[in-house]
Amino acid sequence: MEEAALSWFEELGYAVLGGPDIAPGELFSERGSYGDVILEERLRSALTGINPGIPAEAIEDAYRKLTRTIHESPLLYANNYSFHRMLVDGVDVEYRTSDGRIAGDKVWLIDFNNADNNDWLIVNQFTVIEGQSNRRPDVIAFLNGLPVGVIELKNPGDEQATIKNAFQQIQTYKNEIPSLFPCNEILLVSDGIEARAGTLTANWEWFMPWRTIEGEEVAPKGTPELDVLIKGIFDKQRFLDLLRYFIVFEVDGAKVTKKMAAYHQFHAVNKAVECSFAGDRRIGVVWHTQGSGKSLTMAFYAGKIIQHPLMQNPTLVILTDRNDLDDQLFGTFARCKDLLRQTPVQSERRDDLKELLSVASGGLSLRPSRNFFLRKGQTIPCYPAAGILW
C-alpha cells in the first residue's frame, strides 16, 4: 500500500524520498534532529523564491514569526489555526527601503498562482522523537518544507488492521508527537480497500471518502479508493485551491472545529464560480440531499466569489424560506468570517435591505425574517432575503 501511494504521488509530480535517507546524521540529511518536523532549508529556499522582491531580513523575520507562532499556545488546534491563517493570508512583515522608508508587505508561504513554483515532497517512514515518544508515520506530504499532510496505512492482508485502526493511530500521534501537527492541513487513512480524509479536529464519522478525481464523474466501483483520494485531492492545483478556499475553522464558544469541503462541495462550488463568469451568468442549481452540507457549500461559494479577481466588491443576497434555516445559515456564515474576509450581520427589517441594495457597493444578506449583510471593510444590518444572488 505504501509503495502504491508513493507511485501515485510520483505520477502527480511530487519528489519522493525515504525518511531514513534525510534523517539526522545521514549524508543527505535535511533534519538537525528527530524532533525537527519542518524541513528548514526547503522552507527558507521556498520563501526566497516565492517572494523575490522582499529583502532577506524580512524573509528571516517571516520565518521566525511562523516557527514561533505555531508553538505559542498549549492548544494544538489554536496553533493550527494560526498556521492556517499565515498559509492563506501571508505573513505580515516590515522592512526599511533603500530611501529609508518603513514598508509593510507580506511574505507568502505558498505561491498559489503558480503551483510549480512550490516545493512538493513526499517522505515515507518519517521518524519523529518527542519526549519519550518515538513514532514513525507512514507517509508525510511536505509543501515548501511544511508537513501539511499525514497518511497512515494499514496492511490489507491483516484482518485486524482496519481503516479505523489507522484513524486511532493518528490520534496516538497527535498525543505523543504533537509537534508534527501545527502545520497539518489534511489527514488520510486507508486499509487498502477504503480510504478517508479528515482534518485535525475531525472525529471518525467526519473522515470522508473522495469519490472523484477530476470532478466529472464518480470513480467506477473497484477503483482503489486511495488512488482516487490521492489524485483527487493532491493534484497540485486542486490541493492549493482546497487549502485557500475550502478549509474553515468554526468557533463556537470554547469549541473549535476545522472543516474541509467534501468532494461534492468542492466541485459544485468551482463549477458555480466558473458559471458565474460565463455567458449570461445564469449559474444554475446545486441540488443537495439532507445533511450534505448546504450551508457550508454556500459559504465556500461566497468566500471564493468575494476574492475572485474578476469580481469587484460583490453584493451577495442569501434568501431562505424559513426562520430556522435562516438562523442556521447565518450561524454558518458568522463562524466562517475568516473565509469571507468580513463579518456578517443579521437583521429583521426589509427597509434596511432596500436601502442597502440602492447603493453600488457590495455585501451579503440573508432572509426571511432575519438577515445578514457583508460589505468589504464594514458590516451593515439589512433585511433577510432566499439562495445566493449577486
Image: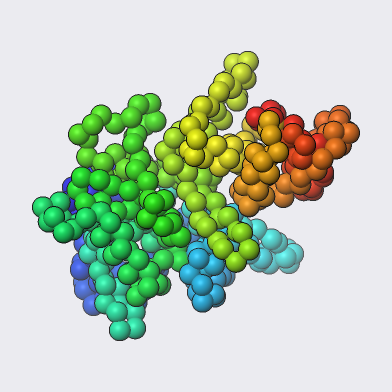
Q: Residue most toward the left?
A: 157
Q: Position of residue 336 (x, y in %)?
A: 62, 50
Q: Which residue is drawn at 22% across and 49% down?
A: 5
Quarter of the picture holding the C terminus: top right
Q: Which residue is drawn at 47% across and 44% down?
A: 261
Q: Where is residue 8 in the image (x, y as percent from the top left)?
A: 24, 44
Identify the image quadrant of residue 301. top right
The answer to whether residue 312 is visible is no
Q: Which residue is drawn at 20% across and 34% down?
A: 222
Is residue 29 found left or right of 120 in the rendered image? Answer: left
Q: Which colour scheme is used?
A: rainbow
Is residue 265 found left or right of 384 in the rendered image? Answer: left
Q: In this rendered view, identify the residue nearer to me: 14 or 331.
A: 331
Q: Position of residue 87 (x, y in %)?
A: 52, 56
Is residue 307 found left or right of 245 in the rendered image? Answer: right
Q: Where is residue 278 in the image (x, y as percent from the top left)?
A: 58, 20
Identify the image quadrant of residue 94. bottom right
Q: In this rendered view, identify the residue nearer to me: 97 or 268.
A: 268
